[in-house]
Amino acid sequence: MAEFKIPLIAVVGPTASGKTSLAVEICKAIDGEAVSCDSMQIYKGMDIATAKPTLEEMQGIPHHLIGFAEQSDDFSVAKYCELAGAAIADIHSRNKKAVLVGGTGLYYSSLVDNIEFLPEESDFEYREMLKKRAQAEGAQALLDELSQIDPEAAKELHVNNLGRIIRALEIFHTTGKTKSMQNEQSRLNPSPYDLTAICLDARDRQFLYDRINRRVDLMLEAGILEEAKAFYDSPLGRTAKQAIGYKELNPYFSGENTLEECVENLKMQTRRYAKRQLTWFRRDSRIKFIYIDDYSCGKELLDAALDIIEKRDVY
């Protein structure tokens, strides 16, 4: 007899693609509750920059793992998987359906593939040495070194993601095993979920980029400048510092750049992030893609998503 798996629907995709709206409509249609899969929406006070859903946008649908962590907290993927797994189990125990929604690919993959996080070995002295090397030689030098040790892990990392580059080098230094080897070992346990995954995309890349640009303009109208100023006046953890939407505006506060220059940079960095998100989700063959520019209204988009869910017949 096949082992029972908890049915789980995932709505993933790039920023500004309409994930929250679609997930809420799916929840309304199937008696579901949303579980956030966003590494920045977990934080309190980071509402506008992270496009955290408002009460109006939630439409009465319970949303889990939103706005509960302090900005000073360092939050790990392992901790997210622990909390998200508990939330999904709780939703299922109440005969509701869990709908995972967000764009953080690492959180999504780690959760749905039941990645087992091995005990972390740390060498803070070695880590500090790598940070000094990055300052002197540039992050690319460390990424090149990682490419020699662990080409698979290096291929997945952007040169700007210095923290993860250093961590991958530290893992090899402290354990003698590459991060890729540890990842393979961590996938030995089967997933507890019967997954139906949907990714929102656009056939016309400019269609998505126009949505991103409009979102940034709306963020300005909503008060992102005030939120960003408060963000930098607060004690920040390593994870929260990575949020797109704040660091791009900091040169405006310091007088280094005009507001217009900072806003254009924010739009560009957000578009680049969306491209990285899509690259991540395209690697998962289980995901069914829905192209938002194929549909003229939200009802048509919802019907397409429900058709995918019904064909999977997980409920």
Image (cartoon, rainbow, N blue to C red):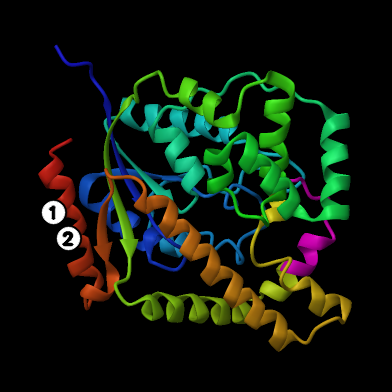
Q: Is residue 83 visible?
A: yes
- Quadrant of the rendering where the C terminus is positioned: top left
Disc 1: CA contacts within 10 A as few (<14), some (14-19) or many (>=20): few
Numbered range of the magenta stretch = 228-238
- Residue at horizontal 22%, vertical 46%? 30
Q: Badge 1 is on which residue?
A: 307
Q: Position of residue 254 (x, y in %)?
A: 88, 76
Residue 251 vertical placement versus 106 (above, below): below
Q: Badge 2 is on which residue?
A: 304
Q: Position of residue 5 (x, y in %)?
A: 26, 24
Disc 2: CA contacts within 10 A as few (<14), some (14-19) or many (>=20): some
In this picture, residue 267 sits left or right of residue 37 = right
Residue 26 vertical placement versus 165 (above, below): below
- Quadrant of the rendering where the N terminus is positioned: top left
Q: Is residue 70 visible?
A: no
- 49 or 182, which is in the foreground? 182
Q: Is residue 230 magenta?
A: yes
